[in-house]
Image: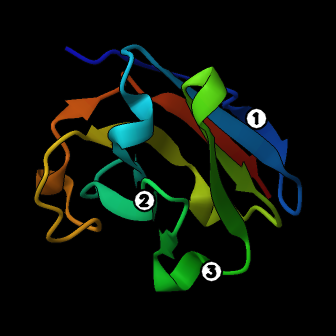
Amino acid sequence: QVQLVESGGGLVQAGGSLRLSCAASGRTFSAYYMGWFRQAPGKEREFVAAIRILGGTYYADSLKGRFTISRDNAKNTVYLQMNSLKPEDTAVYYCAADTSRLHINQASAYQYDYWGQGTQVTVSS
């Protein structure tokens, strides 16, 4: 069983920055692929970024250059640094863990078997 707890969300003006954190339970965090997704009101959950076991990263094309995912295995934590935020970035942001051994599509929510409760990010214009 893996528990994920996100933090760091809040209200920020357009152009500002936020860093989200996701703390994971479990002794094998370093063996998990981790991802961030987001869901805006009335929209489907969408992929934001993923990070592999050895640190390789993968981003939604529309977010490249503004968002950075990273992990600290010693702290069992994954981060999402968000810069140059826009009002359209407003959403609930979810952390997810892929504990499987078969990693087919890190951009698909179905790849992940554990999810956090989400943290709200609101960007004002």
Residue 106 placement: quadrant: bottom left
Q: Which amino acid does label 1 sit on?
A: Leu
Residue that mark 3 sits on: 64
Q: What residue type is labelled 3?
A: Lys
Which quadrant would the N terminus be assigned to in this image?
top left
Q: Which amino acid does label 2 sit on?
A: Arg
Residue that mark 1 sits on: 11
- Where does residue 103 sit, x and y in percent of width and height? 18, 63
Note whether residue 40 is visible.
no
Note whether residue 104 is visible.
yes
Which quadrant would the C terminus be assigned to in this image?
bottom right
- Where does residue 32 sit, x and y in percent of width and height? 34, 42
First of labels 1, 3 by sequence position: 1
Q: Is residue 113 depicted above or below 88 in this figure?
A: above
Q: Is residue 19 left or right of residue 120?
A: right
Between 83 and 96, the residue placed more toward the observer is 96
Residue that mark 2 sits on: 52
Local packing at callout 3 (Cα closer than 10 Å; few below 14, some 14-19, many 20+) is few
Q: Which residue is drawn at 52% across and 28% down?
A: 119
First of labels 2, 3 by sequence position: 2
Q: Label 3's element?
A: loop
Q: Which residue is drawn at 48% across and 41% down?
A: 93
Between 9 and 107, the residue placed more toward the observer is 107
First of labels 2, 1 by sequence position: 1
Q: In this view, does 43 lie to the left or right of 64?
A: left
